[in-house]
Amino acid sequence: MIKIRKAENHHAEQIVQVIKNAEDSGYMMFNPGERVITTESFAKFIDVLNANEKSGVFIACEEHQVLGYLIVQNENPQRVSHRAYVVMGVHSDSRGKGVGKALFSHVISWAKSVRLHRLELTVIAENASAVTLYQKMGFEIEGVKRDSLLVNDGYVDEYYMAKLL
C-alpha cells in the first residue's frame, strides 16, 4: 500500500536515488547524469522547504522504500504567496502504478489546507504520460514555451500548466 507523507531529512538518500532515476528518463530539466546532488545537500533542502508553511517535500512510500517525490516550492512575497511551483518524479519501477496520482491527490488536499490557491508546473510537451496525469489531476495547459529545452541536439517545447484550487 502506497503511503504519502512529508519527507524528513533522513529520507534524502532514497529521494536522491529516485531523482537520479527520474532524470535518466530524459524528461526532466537535467540530462541524465548531468546534475550531482549529495545526500547532505538534499537533506538541508528538505529542512529549508519544510520550514516554510506552504512548501514541502512529499514522498510516496511502500514499506520503507521511497517510490516517488513531489516538491512544492512557495515564495514569500505577498503577491505570489498564494501559489507554488511543483516538481514530481517517480522511480521507473513504480511508474503507471498510481504513485503520481497518490502524490498529487495528497498534495492538492494539503495545499488547500495551507491556503494555496494555485499550483504550477512545466513539462516537456512530448511527455504524453506526464501531461495526461497532470490533466487528470485538474491541471490545464496555460501556454507553450517554444524551443524551451535543448534535448539530444534538438529543441523541444515545454507546457506551462497550472491548477487553481
Image (cartoon, grey):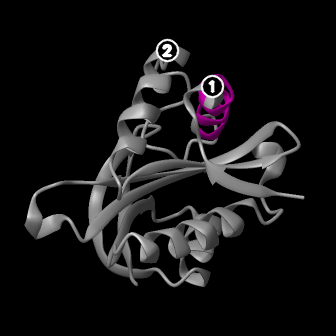
Front one among 53 and 36: 53
Residue 150 in magenta stretch? no
Q: Position of residue 72 (x, y in %)?
A: 42, 54
Residue depicted at 88% across the width and 43% down the height: 63
Residue 21 in magenta stretch? yes
Assess disc 2: are there few (<14), some (14-19) or many (≥20) residues with their C-alpha within 10 Å of its C-alpha: few
On screen, residue 100 versus residue 127, left or right, reads right
Q: Amino acid at mark 1?
A: His
Residue depicted at 41% across the width and 37% down the height: 153
Mark identifier at residue 40: 2
Mark 2 and mark 1 lie on one chain; the one further toward the N terminus is: 1
Mark identifier at residue 10: 1
Q: Which residues are magenta?
A: 12-22
Contact check, label 2 and label 1, Cβ < 8 Å: no
The CA span between labels 2 and 1 is 10 Å
Q: Amino acid at mark 2?
A: Glu
On screen, residue 154 versus residue 108, left or right, reads left
